Image: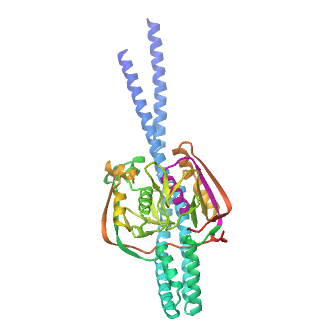
Amino acid sequence: MRMADFDLSWKTKLVFVVTGVIIGLLVTTQFRSSIPTSSYLTDELEVQKQLIKSFMDDQALLKSKLVALRQKIDDQQQKLSASTKNTNLEILDGLKKELGLNQEKGPGVEINLNDGAAASKMKGEEVSQFLVNAADLRDVVNLLRTTKPEAIAINGQRVIASSPITSVGNTIMVNNFHLLPPFKITAIGDVDVMSQRLKDKVSLPDINKRVKENRISFSFKELDSLIAPVYNGDFVFKYIAEAAHQ
Amino acid sequence: MRKRELSILLTAILVGVLIIMQGKSFTSLDQVTNREARTDIFREIQILKNTNDNLNDEVKDLEDKLGKMSGQEAGLQGIASDISKYKLASGQLPVSGPGISFIINGDVSAIWLTDSVNELFAAGAEAVSLNNIRITDQTSGFDTIPNGQIMLNSVILKSPYKIEAIGDKNTLADALSQPQGIIQRLKESVAAVTPELQQKDLIKMDKVI
């Protein structure tokens, strides 16, 4: 009887020791796995953020310069064309319109997409479900493009075929320019066709699912007069050249 | 005996709780790292730098052009050169140059094509085509028709989807094949899809009809 008691006690002790060691390891790992708060990393991130801000400021300045210069050149070309009766200007105007280098005005739809109110309370992976992602904007723009619109813009950034809509970390960039929610997507074109596509729940499955679950907000309205600004990005070609006709 | 059993049970529960907490803390940490990844910030800085460099180049070109516009001949030449440049951009001329060929073998939904094209333009592609359809401002969006097929410019697209892009071939290839890039995400998300990426010295694209 005493021997059995001793065995049980020894086994129990062993279980407790092993368990204690495991708990100790877990507690230690738990403390060690906390989000790094070292000042070096924080400082480095701060420097990177400052650098990004400085690039963004430069970009805004360069873009406004670019638009102003294009306008000045356009004015000069109009004058020149009037005096020389040069018909090439008509071709140039057509190309500029196609490439988003003219401001467009007309009837269309205005779409509002915004993060969910609960986004700030969310943690980890869940939070992205409550935020408007770059992919959401791409899906909306792609849907609008199926209706052959005359112009699309997001928060004042004209979107053309080559406009990238990306996300880097928590930031959304359109034409490599930072944009913040709420996102207002302006599309000029056939209002009925655009409305029909936007009302179709099958068209934007992921957005509609999250709207239904109150995770993000999405709405649109038809308007008689909308303005899409001029594309303010560059057209610098370093790699493409005209190929011989086949 | 009952006390001992109870304490072992409680300890086991505590260990279980700690294991779960630990697992969660690792997951959270991963997410924080991913969202604030250094590579992401570096990539953002690189994108912004390239954008500003290109904007600077164009501003200089335009200033130069504006300065020369006082003369009639130079002004008319300026119009002609703008027309040539914008024709390249709009797809009204056949174009060629170095770049990449990205082939997706297998059935994918339209979002993968939208995202692939977007990724290439984001990496600085100067021209992109999909199954020989040049993506320009005259191109429609990717439309999924009721039977699940994808339509672009009224053409039903079929696998293999061949996306070609002209630009810096190394940058374009890196953008697609980077960790968590479109190739990795495609492989992880869509079964039986085999993406193929090739850098090419010469890619030709026809003009938009």
Question: Where is residue A165 drawn, in percent x and y?
Answer: 47, 62
Question: Where is residue B168 drawn, in percent x and y?
Answer: 63, 64
Question: Where is residue A92 drawn, in percent x and y?
Answer: 52, 80
A79 to B128, vertically: above or below? below
Asked whether the viewer can see residue A232, the reply is no
**How many numbered badges does the structure rendering display?**
0
Residue located 56% across and 79% down the image: B83
A64 to B97, vertically: above or below? below
Displayed quadrant of residue B10: top left
Relative horizontal placement of residue A218, taking residue A11 as reference (left or right): left
Question: Where is residue A220 drawn, in percent x and y?
Answer: 32, 61
B89 to A70, vertically: above or below? above
The figure's colour scheme reads rainbow
Task: Identify the magenta region.
Answer: B97-124
Determine the residue located farthest toward the right in the rendered image: B201
Relative horizontal placement of residue A109, taking residue B127 as reference (left or right): left
In what quadrant of the picture does the N terminus of chain A appear? top left
In what quadrant of the picture does the C terminus of chain A appear? bottom right
Would residue B123 be counted in the magenta stretch?
yes
Would residue A179 be counted in the magenta stretch?
no
Relative horizontal placement of residue A205, taking residue A99 as reference (left or right): left
Q: Nearer the viewer, residue B109 or B156?
A: B156
Asked whether the viewer can see residue A131, the reply is yes
